Each structure stands twice: as C-alpha cells, then as structure tokens.
Image (cartoon, rainbow, N blue to C red):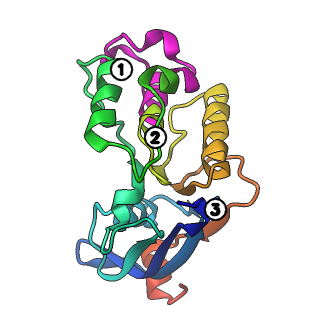
C-alpha cells in the first residue's frame, strides 16, 4: 500500500455534553503527512471531538471515515487510530515492559506495517534503562513518556493526542516533537489538542469555541 492512498475525513460532526450541544458542523480532511491542532479554552470541546474521531463517543450528527486502497470495505476509522488521552492506560503494578508488551499483543499491527520492539520504544522516549520497573514507581513525566511509547510498539497511521505534553519537561517535549515529526514524515496523520506548541511548522489549526460558538453560529 502506498501511503499516499490514506485519508481521514470528518463530515459535519456535532456532539453533546449532557443536554447541551457543544459543537456542530465540524469537518476536516487529513491526508498523509498532515496534522490538525485543536486550540481553545478548557471546556470548548477539544477532548470531545478527539474522542468522537477515535470512536469512543458517538457524534450527534455527521461521520468520520477512513480511506485507503488496502482498507476492508466498511472498516471503521477508529481501527486506523491510536488514541492517547489524559490518562496513560497503564497498570501501576505491572512493569513498563509488561504494560507495553500487553498493548503490543492486544492491538496488533495495522495493514502490514510493524511497530518497533518494546525495548526500542522505551529507548525512543529516553527511558530504556527503566523498563523493568513497575509503572507506578515512575514519576508523572516518566509515565507520560512511557504512555507515548505505546504509540510506537504497534503501528497505526493516525495518532490522536489529547494534551500529549502534559507533565513533561522541556527536554521531554523535544523528544515528543521529534517522534511526532518522524510519524508525519513517514506518511502518518496526527490530530491533537494542546495548549503547548508542538513545533510543527505546517500544521492546520481548528479553534474550538464550545457552547458560545454554537449559540452564536460561528462555526
């Protein structure tokens, strides 16, 4: 499969928080090597939109679709996505190696491309020497790094990242930025919500306004 065949599309998405419509008429089209950064104040719908795209929430209206020549007919867009939310999705009592090994086996690789080994992923986030430790022993910043390593052990063409640099120092932010750029350079796609710059020169931007934007019909 040529990476140029891949595309993630959102059409006229809207979603509710409780009884309230939080956003409406969101559409975008991301092709290989492209990224979209969501900005806006807390509560403006950034995380909700990411979860809708990742298949974790049902939209009120609209749809998310994935296109590639190698995709099976009717394949859900979520199957092409890695999602990194606010929580790290790791068991505190298991070692880092055990956690990453579980996710590697559980997810499996996507359409013929392979992720890296657990050791290589730990090295890539700068923590190769502590993969034997229980995840719960790590600092908040180290835990976030290891959660990011989960994206490397199993291949997915789309990365959906919610505040990926939370709890990180400047050096770790640089590591993340390098890994994200490498993912895009290899034909990946990224969708992220962040208050911190990710160092991406050509990223598209979508400013979320939440309830106010819906009521004022500003989408």
Q: Secondary structure at mark 2?
A: loop
C-beta proximity under 8 Å, tags 2 and 1: no
Is any atom of residue 37 visible in this view? no
The residue that mark 2 highlights is 114
Return the residue found at the far right: 201
Q: Is residue 75 left or right of residue 7?
A: left
Label 2 vs label 3, nearer the camera: 2
The residue that mark 1 highlights is 96
Q: Secondary structure at mark 1?
A: helix
The residue that mark 3 highlights is 34
Q: Is residue 130 magenta?
A: yes
Return the residue found at the far bottom: 217
Residue at x 71% of width, y 52% of height = 200
Residue at x 41% of width, y 15% of height = 131
Q: Is residue 85 left or right of residue 175?
A: left
Q: Residues within 10 Å of mark 2 (few under 14, many from 20)?
A: some
Q: Quadrant of residue 57?
A: bottom left
Instruction: Find the magenta span and give its range.
Output: 123-148
Q: Position of residue 54 (x, y in %)?
A: 36, 60
- CA gap, disc 2 to disc 1? 20 Å
Dot 2 or dot 3, earlier in sequence:
3
Q: Is residue 116 magenta?
A: no
Q: Position of residue 211 (x, y in %)?
A: 42, 76
């Amino acid at each position: 499969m040529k990476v140029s065949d891949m595309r993630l599309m959102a059409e006229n998405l809207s979603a509710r928080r409780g009884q309230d419509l939080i956003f409406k008429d969101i559409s975008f089209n991301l092709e290989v090597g492209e990224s979209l950064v969501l900005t806006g104040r807390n509560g403006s719908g950034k995380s909700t939109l990411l979860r809708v795209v990742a298949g974790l929430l049902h939209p009120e209206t609209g749809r998310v679709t994935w296109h590639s020549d190698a995709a099976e007919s009717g394949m859900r867009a979520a199957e092409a996505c890695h999602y990194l939310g606010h929580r790290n999705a790791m068991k505190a009592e298991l070692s880092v190696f055990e956690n990453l090994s579980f996710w590697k086996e559980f997810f499996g690789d996507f359409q013929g491309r392979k992720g890296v080994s657990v050791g290589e992923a730990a090295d890539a986030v700068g923590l190769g020497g502590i993969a034997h430790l229980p995840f719960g022993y790590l600092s908040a910043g180290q835990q976030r790094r290891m959660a990011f390593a989960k994206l490397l052990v199993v291949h997915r063409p789309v990365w959906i990242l919610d505040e990926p640099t939370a709890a990180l120092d400047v050096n770790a932010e640089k590591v993340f930025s390098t890994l994200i750029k490498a993912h895009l350079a290899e034909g990946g796609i990224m969708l992220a919500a962040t208050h911190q710059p990710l160092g991406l020169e050509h990223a598209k931007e979508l400013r979320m306004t939440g309830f106010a934007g819906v009521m004022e019909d500003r989408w």
